[in-house]
Image (cartoon, rainbow, N blue to C red):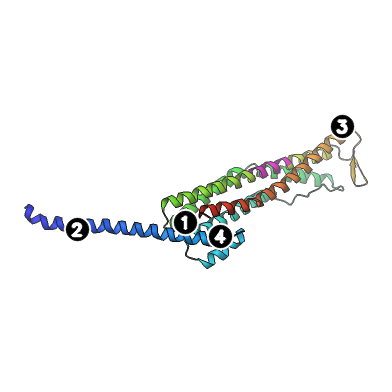
Amino acid sequence: MLGRLAPVLLVLCAFMIVGFIGLYVVGDLSRFQEAISIGEGQVAMRSVSNPEQLDQALKQHPSNAMLKMIAMARLDAIEMDAAARRLLAGAEQNDLPKAIDLASSRSDLDKLLRDLKAAERSIATFEPRYIALIKSERGKLENEARLLRLGNETVLRFMSMIDAQHTEIVAVASKLSATHTEYYKAYEKCVTVLLRDFGIYKVTEGQFVFPFQLTADNYNRAAAAMMTAAQRIAELDNEMTNLRPLQLKRWKAFVGQ
């Protein structure tokens, strides 16, 4: 019986040996192709000094997997920035005026107060919605990265880079959300004072004039807080934009440049 099985066992062993050799060759070829991709990517990234030049680098090397990863990271940064701004802007279901109309009627002020409260409720949901979006996009990015057939270590490094990128964007977006809330609350206080004293205050030389100093002080404090929040929002908008050079530096480090 053993004599009859011997040829079969020999054939099976031969197939296994060939299979192992094939796997080794394929793995070795994959590592070789990845090394070429990294080297080509490093050369291409040397001339990239701003994110806009990445498109040109990818056009010159359309099949380079490392550059494709950088392009994915760049697109992710653009889309997450836009999503944050879109969600923040969406909190204002109606276009809120930047200043209170001196000629506002009571009904105008009532409507403005309702809009402000609605915006504040909406902005309270910003962070969980944005973080959920970030998590969803992260999963898509990882799937796309693995389709490029690069080594697991490279994919893990890429995802670590994406996580750092997302952490920075979420941090600024969260500060923007909190500052928008401060702005709405201060705005509400201004409108509330005007509604409470409607028909009592006067408008003189383009300013509200209240009969009581305490009321004037309350209104002025709220108006000052509103202005401070508006300035801080503008600063944070710039901070979000200023993430781009930091992101480019991280992308270049990823390819070893």
Which residue type does callout 4 highlight?
Arg
- Name the residue carrying label 1: 144
- Would residue 101 be found to the left or right of residue 242 on screen? right
Residue bounds of the magenta highlight: 174-182
Question: Does the magenta segment cover residue 181?
Answer: yes
Which residue type does callout 1 highlight?
Glu
Residue at the image point whose x is 59% and y is 47% from the top? 130
- Name the residue carrying label 3: 214
The residue carrying pointer 4 sits among few (fewer than 14), some (14 to 19) or many (20 or more) residues within 10 Å by Cα, namely: few
Label 4 SS: helix
Outermost right residue: 204
The residue carrying pointer 1 sits among few (fewer than 14), some (14 to 19) or many (20 or more) residues within 10 Å by Cα, namely: some
Label 1 close to label 2 by CB (< 8 Å): no
Q: Nearer the viewer, mark 1 or mark 4?
A: 4
Residue 173 in percent (x, y) is at 64, 46
Q: Earlier in the sequence, mark 2 or mark 4?
A: 2
Q: Nearer the viewer, mark 3 or mark 2?
A: 2
Q: CA distance from mark 1 to mark 3?
A: 61 Å
Asked whether 222 or 168 is in front, the reply is 168
- Name the residue carrying label 2: 14
- Name the residue carrying label 4: 46
Residue at the image point whose x is 86% and y is 37% from the top? 197
Label 2 close to label 4 by CB (< 8 Å): no
Q: Earlier in the sequence, mark 1 or mark 2?
A: 2
Question: Does the magenta segment cover residue 4?
Answer: no
Q: Nearer the viewer, mark 2 or mark 4?
A: 4
Q: CA distance from mark 3 to mark 2?
A: 95 Å
Label 2 SS: helix
